[in-house]
Image: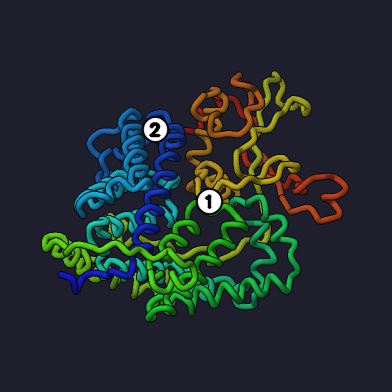
Amino acid sequence: MDWLTAPDYDVARIVLQRGIAGVYLVAFVAVWHQFPALLGERGLLPVPEHLRRSAGRAGPTLFRWRYSDRLLRAVAVTGIVLAASVVVGLPQTGPPWVPMVVFLTLFGLYLSVVNVGQVFYGFGWESLLLEAGFLAAFLGSDEVAAPVTVIWLFRWLVLRVELGAGLIKMRGDPCWRDLTCLYHHHETQPMPGPLSWFFHHLPRPLHKVEVAANHVTQLLVPFLLLAPQPVATVAAGVVVVTQGWLVLSGNFAWLNWLTMILAFSAVGDGALSTVVPGTAATDAHGPLPVWFGVVVLVVTALLVVLSWWPARNLLSPRQAMNASFNRWHLVGAYGAFGSITRRRDEVVVEGTDAADPFEAAGWREYVFRGKPGPTGRLPRQWAPYHLRLDWGMWFLALGSPSQHVWFTRFLQRLLEADPATLRLLAVDPFDGGRPTWVRARVFRYRYSTWAELRRTRQWWVRREVGVLVAPATLADLRRLR
């Protein structure tokens, strides 16, 4: 079945398999560290409660029959070990069924997590990782050349990611069409990075150039991924460079990192070797096993059929963003930031151990790991790691009703000084002790100017604009449930 192979894509397969596995490794590390506190047996949105309410609507998941934090941690450890094995290249040295089994296991385990993750796992890049992992299962091993249909399915995935993001912008906020969105976006994005302050203060004409370049990359370049070599490799390079720019400007979990990895599906060995001599693989491949070729063709046919819904979505004036058309999260619709917020509100959570909650000097602030808090703290680089609680706090500040249920329970856990919850934070001002009262105030944040930064050494300027939760005790919050 040599007609089914793409022998000029060895480097692409190496990057795809190891890169996707690397992202799975990060994702399962986050499951280990964050899932029990957020969604575990005593989590903010406990999985057992969700499964009882959903009555089978949760989608395929191992936890449908039984959930426990111990089982969850076993899933996380298994995912970490399997993903690490691919990163170092162990399964790839065997026959094609070995990496296939490993990637399908990674897919199944992470699907089990996502389908019970509720709002904490309701992000488009979860589906993107699942779809990428499923496709990677059929790339074969070092014994055979990569199947050409799988390479093309990866390119179709990148096209949907980029074109979907471009179209949702052009159909959405007018600031994308007048090229002014970046006047605000670096300041108001969910989780700024260490360079975001500097990106925000770039000259406004350069911001317009950034937006225009983004439109070219997302609306025109994706089609060049389907062109013959070396055009496809050049287009992939453009995608990698622009996604790298986004990595520098903010923390968007693994969205940009994974997109860069997927773009390598368009990088041919021959075209790459002309730019970087010695990078093309020269090992001869054996014949593609008939059984594996049949499996690849069946999977290809299935994914082509499933492509009808996202293709129709791309053409629809009512385009859905980050939509899954099936419970397996295969062949979905992607996109980001169809609208841009013009101001940044942050929920600041505080506690006090004073008997009187109106003693102003007694309140101390809980500091989150990634979201803006103290005005003198420069944001850190977290991506591709995903701080799910911090992202939830950004949506909470936007007024999203779906966030309030877990937030009330979060405040309860602070009053209980729950160790698992406190480990999600950067600073517990009570060092493991129990506060008497908690409250949540809303502050309007903006970046300091160059002059303010030189004078005050503060990256942010903030002022109080409201109260989300008035001072409350544990008994007060329990009555709200």
In the displayed orientation, state which residue is furthest to the left: 290
| x then y, percent, for residue 332 | 35, 63
| x then y, percent, for residue 470 | 65, 35
Under circle 1, the secondary element is loop
Residue found 54% across the figure and 77% down from its top: 216
| x then y, percent, for residue 151 | 31, 68
Q: Which amino acid does label 2 sit on?
A: Gly
Quadrant location of residue 370? Answer: top right
Residue found 46% across the figure and 73% down from its top: 274
Residue found 25% across the figure and 63% down from its top: 284
Q: Which amino acid does label 1 sit on?
A: Ser
Left or right? Give the position of 234 relative to 350. Answer: left
User: What residue is pinned by disc 1?
Assistant: 400
Q: In this view, does 378 lie above or below 301?
A: above
Count residues near mark 2 (Cα–Cα under 10 Å), then give few for <14, some for 14-19, many for 20+. Answer: many
What is the number of the mark on residue 40? 2
Residue found 43% across the figure and 60% down from its top: 261
User: Which quadrant does the N terminus fall into?
Assistant: bottom left
The type of colouring in the image is: rainbow
Under circle 2, the secondary element is loop
Residue 57 seen in the current view:
no
| x then y, percent, for residue 327 | 28, 55
Q: Nearer the viewer, mark 2 or mark 1?
A: 2
What is the number of the mark on residue 363? none
Name the N-terminal-most of marks 2 and 1. 2
Quadrant location of residue 414? Answer: top right
Residue 193 seen in the current view:
yes
